[in-house]
Image (spheres, rainbow, N blue to C red):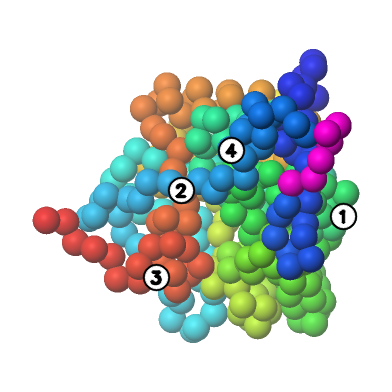
Amino acid sequence: MRGRTPVVTMVAAGVIGVAAGGWPVLTSLGGGSDPALRTELAAVLGDQTWPTPKPGSWTMPKPAADGFPPVVNRIETQERVVFLTIDDGYVYDSEFVNIVRKRRVPIMTFLTTTYIKGQGQYFWAMRNAGSRMENHTVSHPNMATLSPETQRKQICDASDAIQKQYGRRSEIFRPPFGSYNETTRQAAKQCGIKSILLWSAEFYNGTTGPGVGYNGFARGDGGKGFKPGDIILMHYRKGLARDMETMLGWIEQAGFRAAAVENYLPRSLGGNAPDRPTTPG
């Protein structure tokens, strides 16, 4: 963590419990009588909504012809938008919750559910700051090396845990390391997954990337900078709040903005958009 963490952000990450029905409740810390603190906590728990794409500005990803979840690694759009996605969950930064909430940063979390045991409340705070919790397996294996039954268990058990903890079953899957095969797609469908979301660029926040060094940025196509519709991979690592500020600065300097990828995916693929896009005019 960087320096001292504000009390409010620590409380925001820590006071959200889970009631018997799987929904959050506020618990009392130190009496909890401060009106300003109660207002802050209420804001943390307020679901965020994000702008939808302009009609006619994008091409909706399509279902796969074979009926299994399609693999999506970028969105075809004319808008200067990119999509921020964050994987794993083994390290968290309590300052990050406030950045996402106060700056209204749309992100999607791909959660490895073994970390719910130690950090479930933290991800409640993230969920209520506006991040959807999607599936990144139970224990982060290389899926393409596993048997069909083990792949199914990794995906289904993760979706079960997310639904129990956060009140919504995942419909989007990201395989660890981006490794998958046709068995993975079949197993994903059996678990209720509607699409597999990969990425087109990665910010190696908190680590060293091949050929780009520490905290480097790399495109999968070997190019430079951002392209409209990029899906950007980041990870829950130490210093994430600082690194997100860096990423947001790059995005703004390039004349782009962060958008919610779920609003650019049709409902048939686990997103929020109508399956038939509206037409301009």
Range shown magenta: 26-31
Which element is circle 4 on? helix
Image quadrant assignment for residue 69: bottom right
Q: Position of residue 31 (x, y in %)?
A: 83, 34
Residue denoted by label 2: 49
Dot 4 corresponds to which residue? 43
Q: Which residue is mark 3?
A: 62
Dominant SS in magenta? loop
Q: Quadrant of residue 56?
A: bottom left
Looking at this view, is 11 or 181 the one in front? 11
Helix, strand or loop under label 2: loop
In the foreground, 179 or 191: 191
Q: Residue at x 65, y 26 (%)?
A: 36
The residue carrying mark 1 is: 117
Circle 2 crowding by C-alpha within 10 Å: few under 14, some 14–19, many from 20: few
Residue situated in front as seen by the camera: 248 or 118:
118
